[in-house]
Amino acid sequence: MTITTLTTFFMWCTIINVAIMIAWTIVLASAPNFMYRMQTKWFPMPQESFSVIVYSALAMYRIVFVVFNLVPYLALLIVQ
């Protein structure tokens, strides 16, 4: 693989992951009760626990996104 191929790969990974985070945030901000009702059909839990789990998952997703997508992409742009 060339640096150009890797840069393109990480660019698209970054774009896709940003789109996922934006969609997740919009759905979470606009319809939290809908998400809660949908999820508690399978996994019954109190509203407070659901909120903590969802926001923690979003925070973890952001951290993983930065470490495994954004930083390698920026490093490849610097190297190139």
Image: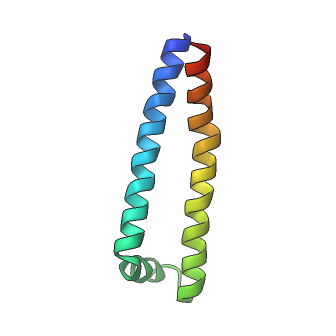
- For residue 26, say whether it is visible: yes
Residue 60: image x %, image y %?
Answer: 62, 57
Q: In this view, does 62 lie above or below 5?
A: below
Quarter occupied by the N terminus = top right
Residue 70: image x %, image y %?
Answer: 56, 36
Left or right relative to 38: residue 73: right
Residue 6: image x %, image y %?
Answer: 53, 20
Q: Name the residue rendered at 58%, 63% in the picture.
A: 57
Q: Name the residue rendered at 55%, 10% in the picture.
A: 2
- For residue 45, say whether it is visible: no
Work out whether residue 44 or residue 26 is closer to the camera in this orientation and state it: 26
Q: Name the residue rendered at 58%, 86% in the picture.
A: 48
Q: Is residue 49 above or below residue 19?
A: below
Residue 27: image x %, image y %?
Answer: 37, 67
Q: In this view, does 15 lie above or below 36?
A: above
Left or right relative to 28: residue 55: right
Left or right relative to 62: residue 21: left
